Image (cartoon, grey):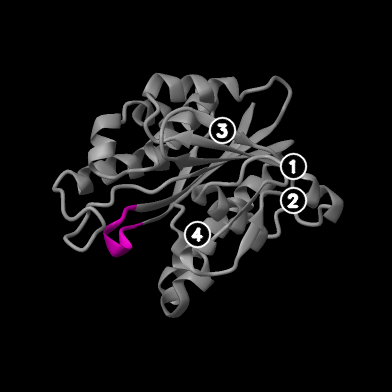
């Protein structure tokens, strides 16, 4: 049973060593993400699943101890997807695939928050995956008698301004507004209704993880709270907590 969820963006700039001199510009976003993670910890989960987008279709699972990093961004930062205080031999034993950037950002968030509330695993969801595939994947995550918490990572549109990565698209602000309201209301129907074609056109990488979350949350009585909604650098970022 899904007992709590946090929704956060996953730009590598959240990692201060990557942002360098501009790190302070995202302090409010980092603080909101930390607040959302505290909601997950307070839910006393048996397991935490970190969802994040990756290029392509389908899904790839990452077990506890999975490693990733940000060497491609010019900083020698390595992260592991796991609880704080986990024994070092277990850290070294993992031999699965490396974390994609989205899940590496999630692992950094958990390390920064000293997450110790429950075991952690990851699920990278293809950005091109269809809505029904995402909803079914989310539904499959529910295990009877297990208290599941989800950290769903993903950015909104990249076309909010002329300086955004995708330039300006007039559809971007209304799209992000729909997403923000759905996250604030824990509205699984609204998230399920997000159009993958429009999401792709607007550069929205969060659509697939949000729809997996929607599939996992269907039939629950979770309520939502929107903790952050801004578009720095022309990209829509949202932080929400469901409990």
Residue 66, horizontal then vertical, whole percent:
67, 46
Quarter of the rendering occupied by the N terminus: top right
Considering only order in the chain, which callout, 3 or 2, is on the residue closer to the N terminus?
3
The residue that mark 3 highlights is 60
Kind of element beneath mark 1: loop
Q: Residues within 10 Å of mark 1 (few under 14, many from 20)?
A: some
Residue 77's quadrant in the figure? bottom right
**SS class of the residue under badge 2?**
loop
Q: Earlier in the sequence, mark 1 or mark 2?
A: 2
Of marks 1 and 3, which one's residue comes earlier in the chain? 3
- Which of the two discs, 2 and 4, sits closer to the camera? 2
Confirm or deny contact between disc 1 and disc 2 (CB under 8 A).
yes
Local SS, label 3: strand
Nearest to the eye among marks 2 and 3: give it. 3
**Marks 2 and 3, how far apart in space?**
20 Å
* Spatial CA span between label 1 and label 2: 6 Å
Residue matched to label 4 = 32
Which segment did they paint magenta?
230-236
Please name the residue that numbered disc 2 is placed on: 83
The residue singled out by tag 1 in the image is 119
């Amino acid at each position: 049973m899904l007992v709590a969820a946090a929704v956060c963006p996953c730009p590598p700039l959240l990692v201060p060593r990557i942002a360098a001199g501009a790190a302070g510009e995202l302090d409010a976003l980092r603080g909101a993400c930390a607040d959302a993670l505290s909601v997950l910890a307070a839910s006393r989960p048996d397991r935490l699943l970190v969802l994040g987008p990756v290029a392509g279709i389908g899904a790839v699972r990452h077990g506890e101890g999975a490693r990733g990093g940000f060497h491609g961004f010019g900083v020698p930062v390595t992260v592991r997807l796991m609880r704080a205080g986990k024994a070092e031999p277990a850290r070294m034993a993992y031999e699965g695939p490396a974390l994609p950037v989205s899940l590496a950002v999630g692992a950094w968030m958990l390390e920064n928050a000293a997450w110790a509330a429950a075991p952690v695993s990851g699920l990278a969801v293809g950005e091109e995956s269809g809505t029904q595939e995402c909803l079914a994947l989310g539904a499959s995550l529910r295990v009877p008698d297990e208290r599941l918490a989800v950290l769903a990572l993903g950015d909104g549109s990249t076309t909010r301004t002329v300086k955004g990565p995708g330039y300006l698209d007039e559809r971007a602000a209304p799209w992000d507004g729909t997403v923000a309201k759905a996250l604030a209301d824990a509205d699984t129907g609204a998230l399920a209704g997000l159009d993958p074609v429009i999401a792709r056109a607007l550069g929205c990488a969060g659509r697939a993880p949000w729809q997996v979350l929607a599939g996992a949350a269907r039939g629950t009585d979770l309520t939502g709270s929107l903790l952050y909604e801004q578009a720095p650098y022309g990209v829509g970022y949202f932080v929400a907590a469901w409990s």
